[in-house]
Image: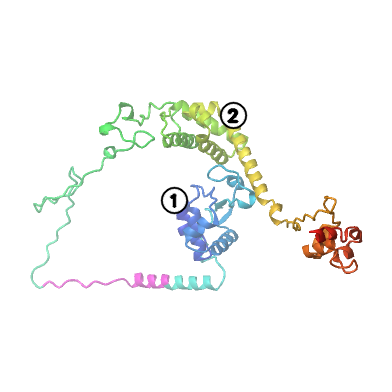
Amino acid sequence: MSWQCTSWALREAPAPTANARLVLIALADRCGPDGRRAWPTITTLSQEAHCSKASTKRALKALEESGCIRRGDQSLAIRDENGQWLPPQYRPIVWECCMDVTIENPARKPGRQARVEREKRGVEQESEQTGTSRGLKMSPLENVGNKPKPRGLKMSPLNSSGVTSDTSRGLTSDTTIKETNIETNTYPSVPTGHLPAGGEIHADEENTEPEPGNVEPSMSVQDDPAREVLDALDLMRSRLGLPVERPNGRDVSKAGGLVAKVASANDGDTGRALAWILAVIGWMPSNTFWLRRVTNGRSLASNWSQIANDYAVDQLETRRRHDAEARDRDKPDTGRTRKATPVPPAYTPPAAASGHAVQILGLRSLARAGVTQHDIDSHLTAQTDTSDCRVCTMEPLNRATHGLTAGQSDAN
């Protein structure tokens, strides 16, 4: 959140429409003090500006054309808030607010609306000049008898409580103003948010602000990225209920050196380096090996190469697992779409006189052609002639078995 950028978007930015100004204010609320590094999604901007997604897209396009905003470093949006890598088609656009662009003076603007504004301002200035030239004439008081006695206004000095009192009238103020002492406010003494027992203040917490002549060299200049890294590490451990060490000067210097080292490997981009370090700290609870060993800024900086390597390998395995799941999910299930081949009912031909089963040739093709069990029995018992038998007609080789069981059926 940046009040400088928000104030510029509210008062000085040349927004083309009202919706564009609302979207610009919502975007400026997420920028830094310099108006950079903001990549909210279209859904977030539309919710904060209370307009539709289509209106938000049109407003961003109009703001970019008017010069209020421009596209920034898109490498800041390659990972989400959990440190997961995002494909290019799912990354939000990184915007920068051009805070040096202000509303143009109407006296220099062309067009009919600018002329109307200039004429309106000219009429107002003429009326003001006319009023001052005429002046206001005050008629003197006509005192009949008693003339007013001139008396000056007495300014009473401030008393010790900060309230004026008029001693000439003999009245004193009833209420006094009590100055607020900021040291009476209680603040958490540890990163976990717990107050000390009984509200006492430890000896090392009193007079934490050093005197101007006694500033240590390592603590004289506090590096904001280093402090942010240490705060993220302490917050992560406190949320897990782990002990938190109070950072000292060496922790700050080591964390600052780590940020500078990672930034040098990323073309000097401190914001990108800080986002990478914070993502690794957020991933650390899933790796208990480093969770046991990294307790402060010094241990984080000394083991950074191994920690970053484990983080990269873990992200690679996660992406491979997701890709494998996506491939398995997209594969068609051939077993469900295949149609089963129709199988004719099982048929056991009757035994011949010799005791062996009679073989019917082409039984499957006969079944598909519609030959029934009654037709087969008629073929074996010779109830029909060879010319009328469907089994013999469709398969001439079956004529050898025509009427093979006729004598057996007569004997029975």
Front one among 283 and 211: 283
Dot 2 surroundings within 10 Å: few (below 14), some, or many (20 or more)? few
In the picture provided, is 153 more to the left or to the right than 83? left
- Quick check: is 140 in the magenta stretch? yes
Task: Residue 332: tell me if it is visible.
Answer: no
Position in image of residue 340 (x %, y %): 73, 56
- Quick check: is 73 in the magenta stretch? no
Disc 1 versus disc 2: distance between alpha carbons? 38 Å
Residue numbers of the magenta segment: 124-143
- The kind of residue on which mark 1 rests is Trp
Residue picked out by circle 1? 3
- The kind of residue on which mark 2 rests is Ser
Task: Residue 329: tell me if it is visible.
Answer: yes
Position in image of residue 259 (x %, y %): 54, 34
Position in image of residue 360 (x %, y %): 85, 56
Dot 1 surroundings within 10 Å: few (below 14), some, or many (20 or more)? some
Front one among 351 and 38: 351
Residue picked out by circle 2? 305
Q: Are marks 1 and 2 in contact (CB under 8 Å)?
A: no
Q: Comparing marks 1 and 2, which lies closer to the viewer?
A: 2
